[in-house]
C-alpha cells in the first residue's frame, strides 16, 4: 500500500488510532477479575521478569514498561502479573482492523496496537471527523470488546495525527490543524515528536534547531543540510501540511528477533542456546514467508552489567536456513572465546539475546555454488511452512525445535506487524 502524496493538504482528515495499554486491556477484556486492577503483562512472571505492558491502572501507580517485576511490586504492591498471550492480541488486532475497514478502505496498520485511517477521500461521506472518531471508539467497544479504549488523533497527515493521539491518554480525542499546530508544538520538546530519538535531536540541535517550532519554520534546504538526507525534507512536509510521507508500507530492510532471558533460563547454557536457535528459526520463518534470503547476519548478547557481545558478518552464500544461521553464530562465538579467553559468552549474566538479518535478496535470485545442493533444503523449508500455514502452527516441527521440557515462548512486539498483516488480510477475506 502506498497512499503517500505530495500536495498541500490542510484539512484534518487523517485519523490515527492508538489502542490504550493494549496487551493489558486485552487481558482485562478476557478476564473480568483483572478489570480495574493494576495489571502488568510480562513474558515471564518470575521476580526478574520484565514488565512489557502495564495496564492504565498500573501506569497511574507509576509502573512503567521495562521495569523488573520486583521493582514494580515495590511501588505497586497489589500489582497483578499476567503472562503474555500473543495469539489473543493478534486476534483483537485483526478484529479492530476489521472494524476500521468498515469506515474506509484506506486503513494502514502501523503496529499491533496502532493504525491510520485516511478519510481524505471520504469528506463527502463524513461531514464531521470527530463524529467518525467517536463512532470508531464506540464500534470497537461494542463489536470487539467493551474494555478496549483508544486514543484517536485527527490531523491533515498521518504523522500529525499520531502526534495528536499522544496528546490525551487514555480514551483521548485530539485534533491538530493549521489553527492550533503552533500552540501544540510550542509545548513539546524535539524528542516528543514520534521518530525523533536522542541521536536525531542531537543532530538537529547541532544545526541550531532546538524546538519543534524551529523545526517547523526552518527552510527545507536548511533541514536537508542538517539531516544530511531527504529526511529533512520530510520533516518540513509533515509540519507544514505539505503532503503525506508516512502512508506507505515499507519494504523489508531488516528483520530482528530479540528475547529477554528469565532468571531460570540464564542458568543453563543449553537453554540459552535453545533461545538463540528459536530466534534464528523465527527469522527463517519470516524470510520464507517473504521469499527473501539475507546476505548479512548480526547476533548479539547483552549482559546485566551493561556489557554487550556483538557480531556481524556478510555471508558469501545468501542464507535463509535458521539452523545454518544458528550454527554460524555459535561457531563464531566459540572462535571468539578460544581467541580471546575470558568467560564463556553464554553465561548466567545474560540479559538478552538478539539476532538480526539484513541486505536481502529475493529468493528467486539466489544463485547456488556449483557443488552445493541447497535446492532440496529450500524446498523442504517452503513445504514445512506451507503445511503449517494450512493446518496450524507447529503441525510439523524439526527435531531440533522440539524441547518439551523448556518450551520457548513466542514473543510479540509492539513494532513490526508486517508478517502479521499477511495473515490479517487473509483472515479478513
Ligand atoms: Mg498504544
Image: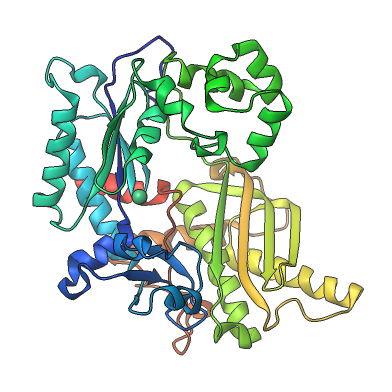
The x and y percentages for residue 272 are 61, 79
Look at the picture and state if 12 lies above or below 308: above
Residue 427 appears anywhere in the view? no
Residue drawn at x 47%, y 77% as measured from the top left: 408
Q: The C terminus is located in which quarter?
A: top left
Residue drawn at x 18%, y 29% as measured from the top left: 130
In the displayed structure image, the side of residue 160 where residue 318 appears, left or right: right
Look at the picture and state if 1 lies above or below 144: above
Depth check, front residue: 263 or 78: 78
Residue reaching furthest left? 142
The x and y percentages for residue 16 are 31, 35
Q: The N terminus is located in which quarter?
A: top left
In the displayed structure image, the side of residue 301 where residue 239 appears, left or right: left
In the displayed structure image, the side of residue 314 where residue 60 appears, left or right: left
Depth check, front residue: 248 or 21: 21
Residue drawn at x 32%, y 63% as measured from the top left: 55
Q: Quadrant of residue 241?
A: top left
Q: Quadrant of residue 273?
A: bottom right
Depth check, front residue: 132 or 110: 132
Residue drawn at x 50%, y 38% as measured from the top left: 192
The x and y percentages for residue 222 are 67, 14
Depth check, front residue: 117 or 176: 176
The x and y percentages for residue 134 are 15, 36
Tag count = 0
In the displayed structure image, the side of residue 315 where residue 338 appears, left or right: right
Amino acid at each position: 500500500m502506498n497512499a503517500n502524496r505530495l500536495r498541500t493538504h490542510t484539512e484534518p482528515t487523517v485519523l490515527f488510532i492508538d489502542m490504550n495499554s493494549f496487551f493489558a486491556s486485552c487481558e482485562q477484556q478476557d478476564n473480568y477479575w483483572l478489570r480495574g486492577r493494576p495489571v502488568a503483562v510480562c513474558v515471564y512472571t518470575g521476580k526478574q521478569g520484565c514488565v512489557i505492558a502495564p495496564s492504565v491502572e498500573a501506569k497511574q501507580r507509576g509502573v512503567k514498561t521495562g521495569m523488573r517485576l520486583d521493582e514494580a511490586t515495590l511501588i505497586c504492591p497489589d500489582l497483578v502479573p499476567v503472562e503474555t498471550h500473543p495469539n489473543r492480541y493478534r486476534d483483537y488486532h485483526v478484529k479492530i482492523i476489521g472494524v476500521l475497514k468498515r469506515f474506509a478502505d484506506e486503513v494502514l496498520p502501523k503496529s499491533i496496537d496502532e493504525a491510520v485511517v485516511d478519510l481524505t477521500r471520504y469528506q463527502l461521506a463524513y461531514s464531521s471527523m470527530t463524529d467518525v472518531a467517536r463512532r470508531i471508539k464506540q464500534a470497537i467497544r461494542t463489536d470487539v470488546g467493551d474494555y478496549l479504549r483508544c486514543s484517536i488523533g485527527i490531523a491533515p497527515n498521518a504523522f500529525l495525527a499520531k502526534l495528536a493521539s499522544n496528546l490525551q491518554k487514555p480514551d483521548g480525542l485530539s485534533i491538530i490543524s493549521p489553527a492550533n499546530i503552533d500552540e501544540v508544538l510550542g509545548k513539546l520538546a524535539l524528542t516528543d515528536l514520534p521518530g525523533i530519538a536522542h541521536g536525531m535531536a542531537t543532530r538537529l540541535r547541532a544545526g541550531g534547531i532546538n524546538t519543534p517550532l524551529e523545526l517547523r519554520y526552518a527552510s527545507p534546504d536548511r533541514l536537508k543540510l542538517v539531516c544530511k538526507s531527504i529526511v529533512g525534507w520530510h520533516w518540513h512536509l509533515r509540519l507544514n501540511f505539505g503532503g503525506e510521507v508516512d502512508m506507505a508500507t515499507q519494504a523489508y530492510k531488516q528483520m530482528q528477533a530479540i528475547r529477554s532471558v528469565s532468571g531460570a533460563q540464564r542458568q543453563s547454557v543449553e537453554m540459552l542456546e535453545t533461545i538463540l536457535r528459536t530466534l534464528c528459526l523465527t527469522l527463517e520463518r519470516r524470510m520464507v514467508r517473504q521469499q527473501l534470503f539475507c546476505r548479512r547476519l548480526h547476533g548479539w548478547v547483552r549482559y546485566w552489567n551493561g556489557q554487550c557481545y556483538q557480531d556481524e558478518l556478510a555471508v558469501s552464500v545468501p542464507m535463509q536456513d535458521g539452523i545454518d544461521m544458528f550454527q554460524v553464530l555459535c561457531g563464531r562465538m566459540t572462535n571468539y572465546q578460544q581467541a580471546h579467553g575470558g568467560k564463556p559468552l553464554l553465561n548466567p549474566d545474560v540479559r538478552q539475546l538478539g539476532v538480526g538479518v539484513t541486505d536481502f535478496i529475493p529468493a528467486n535470485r539466489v544463485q547456488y555454488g556449483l557443488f552445493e545442493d541447497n535446492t532440496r533444503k529450500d524446498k523442504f523449508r517452503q513445504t514445512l511452512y506451507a503445511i503449517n500455514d494450512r493446518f496450524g502452527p507447529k503441525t510439523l516441527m524439526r527435531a531440533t525445535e522440539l524441547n518439551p521440557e523448556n518450551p520457548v515462548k513466542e514473543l510479540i512486539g509492539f513494532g513490526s506487524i508486517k508478517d502479521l498483516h499477511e495473515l490479517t488480510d487473509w483472515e479478513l477475506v
